[in-house]
Amino acid sequence: MENLPTVIIKPGDANRVLGGHPWIYSGSVVRITAPAEDGALVQIKDHRQRFLGTGLYNSKSKILVRVLSPERVTLNVDFFEQRIREALAVRTRFMPGATSFRVVNAESDFLSGLIVDKYEDALVIQTSALGMETRKPLILEALQKIFSPKIIMERNDSGFRKFEGMQDSNGVLFGQLDGPVNIALNGIKFQVDLVKGHKTGMYLDQQVNYEKVAKLVRGGNVLDCFTFLGGFALHAARTGKAKVHALDQSEDAIKASQENARKNNLTGSCTFETTNVFDWLKARTAVQPHERVIPQFEMIILDPPSFTKNRASVGDAMRGYKEIHLRAFKLLKPGGTLATFCCSHHVDANLFQEVILEAAFDARRVIRKIETYSQSPDHPVIPSIAETEYLKGYSYEMAR
């Protein structure tokens, strides 16, 4: 193996690496034994010269080194093929029937800075680390060997790239894209725009939760807030037990949801509306002091986008979460069900549940917990890497 530049880290910081966290910040580094090019492979040692692993170096990034392995490795096609196959085995084991899912979830699959999403025969990759970007040809070759896809695209417009000194880069890397891609989640058909859709096309992390929440539908009227492509709405409508009304502020998302409903013969069971969800909820819960809000829904689903991108904005985010929950509780009928989610890493499960309880108290409601949710298994959680756990959710029954 070639001689690698050595990154020596400070006393005490070695434990974090030994515990499995792959990020080494510049403040944790004592010195580098030789000049290293940005994106290069380096070895990591503690202050006593004990070997800790190998990783990718970038002087332009706040994350100076991204650890790839506790062993000495060679970054060739075989390395990426093995890692991706190991990640795929996890999906096959826990989501055996899925045909669209996240194949590689960066740190969760020990490939920090790389995401690969599979939409049937199409793959979409994101590289948020310079070391992965420079090895994109190796990654593409490994993906072609494993999946034989018809299309490989890159959606590299993440804000994280600028912290790595990289420009946005989007487009087809292999094959030909002729328009939206048709996929199936839990047997429901979706049309996904791989060019303009959110993230790599759509959110795949709720795939398991779509079915779990749909099992709670008992009848009556269901309100799906922040529906995006209609994931929860269509799963609820498919039960045949309820009428579903779905809201989203994006006109494009609502049009796509309507098309998805048509593809699944569910247009008679669900309606869609382009609106600001906060304003919609506020308008239907605004009453005079002597009046009462009349509850309208047997189930309400709240799946908003992240309200916070950093710790400094957590306070504002919590006020937003409390607002939508307070108004949702007022619109929920006695005995009704609320399913609610938070996808912000900076808001942990305890804080999220605390704001839900505060909203229930202000609405003079007592709620009974039904179930706790996390992200689908194709977005694995590594407990020693807190950043891998971001999606949390709960369902509650209105006790009284």
Image: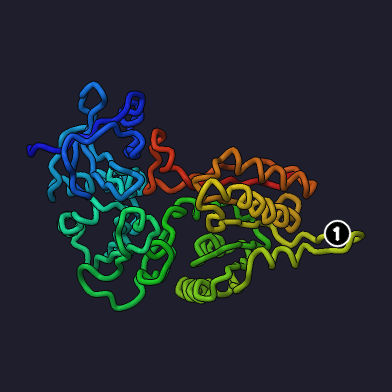
Q: What percent of the width, then of the height, locates residue 72? A: 15, 35
Which image quarter holds the N terminus?
top left
Taking 130 as reference, is 182 left or right?
Answer: right
Give the residue furthest to the right.
290
Q: What percent of the width, then of the height, locates residue 347? A: 55, 44
Number of labels in the image equals 1
Residue behind mark 1: 292
Taking 322 as reference, is 38 left or right?
Answer: left
269 in relation to 313, above or below: below
Q: Nearer the viewer, residue 350 or 58?
A: 58
Quarter occupied by residue 246: bottom right
Q: What percent of the width, then of the height, locates residue 276? A: 63, 68
Residue at the spot 61% in from the left edge and 57% down from the top edge: 301
Residue at the spot 56% in from the left edge and 40% down from the top edge: 349
Residue at the spot 56% in from the left edge and 56% down from the top edge: 303
Structural crowding at the residue carrying mark 1, measured as other residues with C-alpha within 10 Å and reported as few (<14), some (14–19) or many (≥20)? few
Q: What percent of the width, then of the height, locates residue 331? A: 74, 58
283 in relation to 344, above or below: below
Residue at the spot 39% in from the left edge and 69% down from the top edge: 192
Callout 1 secondary element: loop
